[in-house]
Image (spheres, coloured by chain):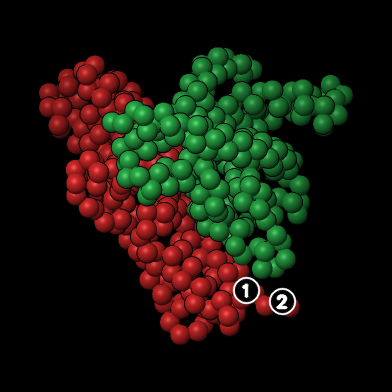
């Protein structure tokens, strides 16, 4: 093990990890927004929208992110939609994550008994008020485990970003292996940096899950 | 109507070549699933053991495999074995090793979950009837877990097929690589080939994975 090599190239990995985290969380944030909107639309069974969302979910969940990225990055410019690598990474992750987040939130919403909505409405709350103050808080606590699992899944999926020429951790590792043949060192740093990114989320997830378990109503 | 570059697909053997590339990825996932399922069942049973050492070792294995992106695992096996052991393994072999290790971990966790959901009195009743542990599993526990496991294992197949698209990144010639070659070869005659070809690849994956997920969903509802 060549520690000098590791020390020398540590800043390179840090940059790459920052890029991964930045694009990863930007994509996840949009995915959460998409997921919330879609889940609420499905919950209220909005006529046409419901069908469109189901089609979107099926396409997004049944195709690999790598192919989605290739399509966004190389195919969309051909019909006049230009993309940059960063925008492509965020958009791809949001497209994939949106459907996973929708499923997480939807299962939470479905777990809330219909009587909760009926009672809220009979107390004179508007539908939107009932959703915000009665349904959502209960649904969210049910969604947390699936939500955290999705965040970890999506952060892991960012590893394919180098395919659209983003200089992420995978790109850096492959580059160093190709240039200097320091395979063991490069792979070790790769693993360590992914652990730094993913372990805290995983631990936070299990803590949250334990704390929220009793937050549901009537259980 | 702009040129969407779909004509490229019908030139020469392009469509056949794409399908051939797809088969490479699907073949690797099917082989990996076929090995993962029995190994995963075994791992799942081992994980319910009370021995703290066995518990710790299987737990670390599971957590490591599951927290690492599959592409990182592919890099470790593909590049790592060459430098650590001095042997050159092909991209295909590296893929099968990684996807089997990953599939075994996922399957093992599913099996463990299904096993611990079986109430304790099932084991105790079987023991009271003087069944050996092997008989208990074979005749009492496994039949009850299988129904829960089948939809989840089918889901694992679609996840496996989607994940095998990563083998492009360690240089295996599969559908995306073939797509790149086709686009490159036709860049003069149809500059928009990228649209048609990548759309087709996306559609191909969808056509394979969608029916399988539908089947899993239906079985889950029926047996759930």
Residue B129 to residue A149: above or below: above
> Would you say residue B117 is visible in this rendering?
yes
CB-based contact (under 8 Å), mark 2 and mark 1: yes
Q: Which chain is red?
A: B
Q: How many labels were placed on the picture?
A: 2
Secondary element type, mark 2: loop
Q: Residue at x 51, y 53 (%)?
A: A163
Residue in the foreground of this view, choosing between B57 and A86: A86
Let me know if residue A152 appears in the view: no
Query: Going by the image, does A119 lie left or right of B180?
Result: right
- Residue A156: image x %, image y %? 48, 39
| Residue B2: image tag | 2
Mark 2 and mark 1: Cα distance apart in space? 9 Å
Relative to A81, B31 lies left or right: left
Question: How packed is label 2: few (under 14 Cα within 10 Å), some, or many (20 or more)?
Answer: few
| First-in-chain label (2 vs 1) | 2
For the point 63% across and 47% down, the residue is: A86
Residue at 28% from the left image edge and 50% from the top image edge: B94
Secondary structure category for the residue under label 1: loop
Q: Which residue is mark 1?
A: B192
Q: Chain A drawn in what color?
A: green
For discs 2 and 1, the disc positioned in front in the rendered view: 1
Q: Chain of mark 2?
A: B
Residue B40 percent coordinates (x, y): 27, 39
Residue B203 placement: quadrant = bottom right
């Amino acid at each position: 093990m060549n520690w000098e090599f590791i020390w020398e190239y540590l800043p390179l990995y840090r940059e790459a990890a920052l890029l991964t985290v930045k694009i990863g969380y930007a994509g996840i944030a949009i995915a959460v927004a998409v997921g919330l909107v879609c889940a609420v639309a499905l919950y209220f069974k909005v006529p046409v929208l419901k069908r469109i969302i189901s089609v979107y979910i099926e396409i997004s969940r049944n195709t690999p992110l790598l192919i989605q990225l290739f399509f966004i990055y190389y195919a969309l410019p051909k019909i006049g939609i230009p993309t940059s690598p960063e925008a492509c990474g965020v958009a791809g992750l949001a497209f994939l994550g949106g459907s996973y987040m929708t499923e997480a939130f939807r299962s939470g919403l479905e777990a809330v008994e219909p009587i909760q909505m009926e009672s809220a409405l009979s107390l004179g709350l508007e539908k939107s008020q009932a959703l915000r103050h009665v349904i959502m808080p209960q649904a969210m606590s049910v969604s947390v485990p699936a939500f955290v699992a999705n965040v970890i899944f999506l952060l892991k999926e960012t590893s394919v970003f180098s395919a659209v020429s983003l200089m992420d951790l995978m790109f850096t590792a492959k580059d160093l292996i190709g240039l200097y043949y320091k395979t063991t060192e490069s792979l070790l740093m790769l693993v360590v940096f992914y652990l730094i990114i993913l372990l805290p989320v995983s631990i936070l997830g299990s803590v949250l899950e334990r704390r929220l378990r009793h937050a549901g109503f009537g259980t | 109507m702009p040129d969407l570059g779909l004509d490229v697909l019908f030139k020469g053997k392009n469509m056949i070549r794409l399908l051939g590339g797809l088969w490479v990825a699907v073949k690797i996932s099917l082989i990996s699933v076929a090995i993962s399922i029995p190994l995963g069942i075994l791992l799942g049973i081992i994980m319910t053991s009370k021995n703290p050492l066995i518990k710790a070792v299987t737990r670390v294995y599971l957590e490591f495999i599951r927290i690492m992106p599959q592409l990182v695992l592919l890099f470790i096996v593909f590049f790592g074995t060459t430098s650590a052991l001095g042997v050159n393994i092909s991209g295909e072999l590296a893929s099968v090793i990684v996807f089997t290790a990953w599939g075994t971990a996922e399957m093992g966790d599913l099996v463990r979950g299904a096993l611990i959901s079986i109430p304790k009195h099932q084991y105790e009743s079987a023991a009271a009837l003087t069944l050996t542990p092997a008989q208990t599993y074979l005749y009492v526990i496994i039949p009850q877990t299988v129904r829960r496991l089948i939809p989840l294992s089918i889901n694992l197949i679609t996840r496996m097929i989607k994940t095998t698209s990563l083998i492009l990144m360690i240089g295996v010639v599969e559908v995306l690589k073939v797509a790149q070659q086709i686009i490159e070869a036709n860049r003069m005659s149809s500059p928009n080939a990228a649209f048609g070809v990548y759309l087709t690849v996306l559609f191909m994956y969808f056509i394979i994975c969608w029916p399988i997920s539908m089947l899993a969903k239906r079985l889950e509802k029926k047996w759930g």
